Amino acid sequence: MAKTKNIKAGKAAQLKIQQMAFMIMAVFIFFILAGIFFVSVSVQGMKRDVTRLEREKAIATVANLVDTAEFTCGKSLCLDADKLIVLSSGMKDVFEGLWPVAGIKVRKLHPLISMQNIEDVECTRLTYPECNVFDVYKNDEVKTAGAVSSFVALCRKENKEGFVYDKCELGQINIAYRAVE
C-alpha cells in the first residue's frame, strides 16, 4: 500500500513537472511573439518617419532648387526654360548625385499647347518650345513614394521684331521623393 502511494505521488509529481515545463514553454513563446510584434511595429514607425523625412527633404529641395543657377531666370520662383531644355536633353548623368531626390519634372500649365491636344508633349531640342513637360532628372534605380510640387514662372527668351524679351508662362515643378523599402 505504501508502495502504491509512492508510485501515485511520483506520477503526480511527474505530471506537475510536465505542466510546469509546458507553462514555461508557453510563456517563453508568448514573449517571443510579443517581441516580434513590438519589433514589427517599431520598424513600421521607422519606415513612416523615414518617408516623412524624405518628403520634407523634397519640399526643402523644391525651395532651394528653384533659386539655383542651373534653373533660375534671375527672379524668385522663376525657371529658365532654355536652361531646362539643356538639362533635360543629355545632362541627367552629370547631376546624378547632386540632387537628393528621385526625380524632377517641370510642367507648363498655361497656356496650353493647343486646346485640341491636351496630351503631354515632352520637351526636347526638336519639340521646344511647342511642348509642355521637361523631364529634367529621373533616378531609375530608386522607387518613388510620392511627389511635392510648387507653382513657378517658366520663362524663356523671345525675339520679336528685333526686340528680345522674357516670355513667361505658368509652370509647376514636381519633385519625386524616394520610397523606403
Image (spheres, helix red, strand yellow):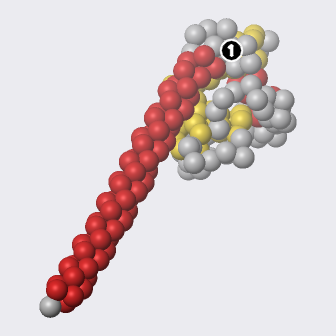
Percent of width and height locating residue 149: 51, 31
Q: Is residue 162 above or below residue 100?
A: above
Residue beneath the point at 38% across and 48% down: 38
The answer to whether one can see residue 138 in this image is yes
Percent of width and height locating residue 46: 47, 39
Q: Is residue 121 above or below residue 31?
A: above
Which of the 4 image quadrants contains residue 15?
Answer: bottom left
Q: Nearer the viewer, residue 27 or 132?
A: 27
Q: Residue under circle 1? A: 68
Horizontal arrangement in the rendering, residue 42 relative to residue 77 (left or right): left
Which of the 4 image quadrants contains residue 155?
Answer: top right
Horizontal arrangement in the rendering, residue 121 relative to residue 27 (left or right): right
Horizontal arrangement in the rendering, residue 181 relative to residue 164 (left or right): left
Judged from this view, the residue extending furthest toward the front is 2
Residue beneath the point at 65% across and 37% down: 103
The answer to whether one can see residue 149 in this image is no
Percent of width and height locating residue 28: 37, 59
Residue beneath the point at 16% across and 86% down: 2
Percent of width and height locating residue 157: 73, 18
Q: How dense is the environment of label 1, judged by Cα within 10 Å: few (below 14), some, or many (20 and up)? A: few
Give the total number of marks visible in the rendering. 1
Q: Nearer the viewer, residue 48 or 62?
A: 48
Which of the 4 image quadrants contains residue 4?
Answer: bottom left
Label 1 residue SS: loop
